[in-house]
Amino acid sequence: MIESLSKKHIFYYLALILILILGFLLAYINSSNRQIQILAVVFTAISYVFWGILHHLFNHDLSMKIMVEYVLIGSLGLAIILILL
């Protein structure tokens, strides 16, 4: 069952990995420009939240609890990175 579930969602996971890698690369490549780094981190956090909401929307299990969870995790990650920058 776990294998079929993983195969079913592989494209969602690949999209998430792509979003996070692109966000990291944008921030890393522009390490000399703090404003672009911040924009890259904000873009990555927003993309993560939208990805999570769309993923659950397409799988018909979206609820307010899940939406709040993605927003809080995205905000926490954003806050941690912005504090470190």
Image (spheres, rainbow, N blue to C red):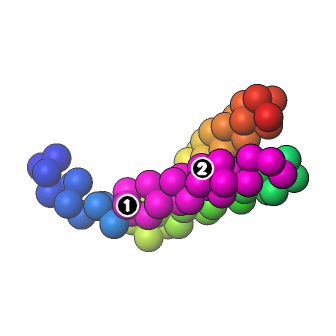
User: Going from the N terminus, do you reach mark 2 or mark 1 first?
Assistant: 1
Choose between 11 and 84: the one closer to the eye: 84
Query: Quick check: 71 left or right of 52?
Result: right
Spot occupied by residue 10 in the image (x, y as percentages of width and height):
29, 61
Q: Which residues are magenta?
A: 12-33
Q: What residue is drawn where x is 20% and y is 60%?
A: 7
Which residue, given by chain and number where applicable, does mark 2 sit on?
A: 24
Residue at point 73% right, 41% down? 78
Which quarter of the picture shows residue 74?
top right
- Inspect this view and state whether residue 66 appears: yes
Q: Position of residue 45 (x, y in %)?
A: 67, 51
**Residue 63 or residue 13, whichever sits in front:** 13
**Residue under label 1:** 14
Q: How many marks?
A: 2
| Helix, strand or loop at mark 1 | helix
SS category of the residue bearing label 2:
helix
- Name the spot of residue 4 as percent of width and height, x first: 15, 57
Residue 33 point in image, percent of width and height: 84, 51
In front: label 2 or label 1 = 2
**Could you tell me how far apart the alpha carbons at marks 2 and 1 are, in whole angstroms?**
15 Å
**Is the C-beta separation of discs 2 and 1 under 8 Å?**
no
Q: Is residue 84 left or right of residue 71?
A: right
Q: Amino acid at mark 2?
A: Phe
